[in-house]
Amino acid sequence: MSWSGLHWSRSLRFRLLAVTVAGVAVAVVLAGVVLSGLFREHVQRQFEAALLQQLDQVTARLEFDAQGRPAIAAQALSDPRWLKPYSGLYWQVDAMAPDGHGRAGVLRSRSLWDTSLALQVDALTDGAVHVHEVAGPQGAPLLVLERSVRAEGAETARWRLIVAADLQATQAATARFTRVLALSLAALLVLLAAAAWAQVAVGLKPLRALQRGLLDVQQARATQLQGAFPVEVQPLVDDFNAVLGRNAEVVERARTQAGNLAHALKTPLTVLENAARASPPDDGGALAALVHDQVRVARRHIDWHLARSRLAASARLPGQRTALEPVVGGLVRVMNKVHAGRGLDIRVVLPDAPLFFAGEAQDLQEMLGNLLDNACKWAQSTVRLQAQALGGRQPQVVVSVEDDGPGIGAAQRAQAVERGVRLDETVPGTGLGLAIVQDLAAIYGGRLDLEPADLGGLRVVLALPAAREAV
């Protein structure tokens, strides 16, 4: 099992941050639109209210002569803008015919100078005030308030009284408010995004601690998850540690049962083999030879299946870690004793940095022991073992064992790793060494390659998963 998938926490952080920032951005934009609209509406109402006061003032100053003609004394109006040409504040009186048409600009303020306000025909009821937006002098946008009035005693003559004011100052104020609001909300968005990032980072911190704990288990720096976790995460940690504990118990039981089975089977086989050797040669030794061969075959199969069952129970469990150098050193000492009579030169080349195998020491001993023993059997004078570390997403320890023996041809290399195959019956062995190594390496996710050696014989390259050095 690989824990590399736990890097999902990083993408989860960004997904949570993106969702949070997107929600905040939408809220800020909606708030900006609402606030800008409310401010614009408020300014518009205030402007209309002020202009309505001007309309009321003009209406109060409107008088009619004996013939019913209107007149307004400009000096009676308090605002000096009525007298300044194109000041932005205007009034005008239009005559309205019964059919709705009439004559525009019968009276107008001096501020209109030589122009008049052109309004569409509007069905006004007496006293009602209508609001419009039109283009005024020099193309300036104007807000217009109008009402219909009559002279006393004149039932048919109607007059339209108009007051208009320039909207440019109001629009500019609204635009400035909108810009300031946009800048303020942008700054607020940045602050809220930073707060969201901090919240997500703090919220996911326990998951990063959990990830580090899992990596420690994977790299054999710990056998269980360790550390202080929040109450929301602690139940998961407890359950995971319980699973690791149960797996360790299962492995221990499997190892014990495998050992018991080995003793239970090997003891009767040993008795049979001894009996065959001690039996009288009544039939020329044929029966003893047959029993001896069959016992050897039975032992070979027992060793094979026990090794596979033991490995299947224990391989690739988290928390396993074995240093390479002590195992190699012990095996070299054993090989020097076993093959002492041949005077072999067993050379070991290891890097300065320690190498660690992500597995059990017993499995590493069995694999390297088979490779070294096989190389010593075939070597003429020299056996060389080298090791190096390969980095990457899945780091590996690569061990090569080569000899200066006769080697194996390319056509026979695939056959050499088959179970029970012996290429030379003159060399003692069961034919299981390379096959067991290949099966062990495959279960750990490694590989076994056979290739020509620089020494002239066979080089066996074993690649296994690596564990990092404890910190």
Image: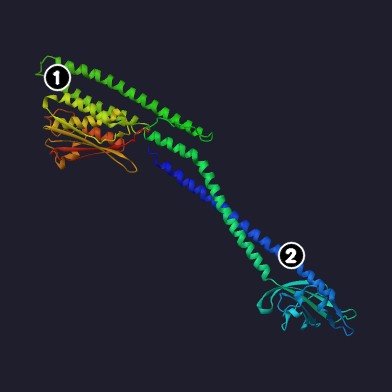
Q: Is residue 419 visible?
A: no
Q: Whole-percent x and y of residue 297?
A: 20, 26
Say few, some or many: other residues with alpha carbon within 10 Å of mark 2 (under 14 / 14 to 19 / 20 or more).
few
Q: Residue 403, located in which quarter of the rendered image?
A: top left
Looking at the rendered structure, which numbered label has been put on residue 288?
Answer: 1
Locate residue 8, reporting x and y percent.
44, 44
Drawn side of residue 272 relative to residue 362, left or right: left
Q: Tell which of 396 and 426 is nearer to you.
A: 396
Work out whether mark 2 precedes mark 1 in sequence or the reverse, and give the earlier one: 2
| Residue 191 visible to an observer of this rendering | yes
353 over 198 or under it: above or below: above
Marks 2 and 1, how far apart at CA: 121 Å
> Relative to 95, is 462 on the left or the right?
left
- Label 1 SS: helix
Q: Which residue is mark 2?
A: 46
Answer with left or right where residue 390 lies relative to residue 385.
right
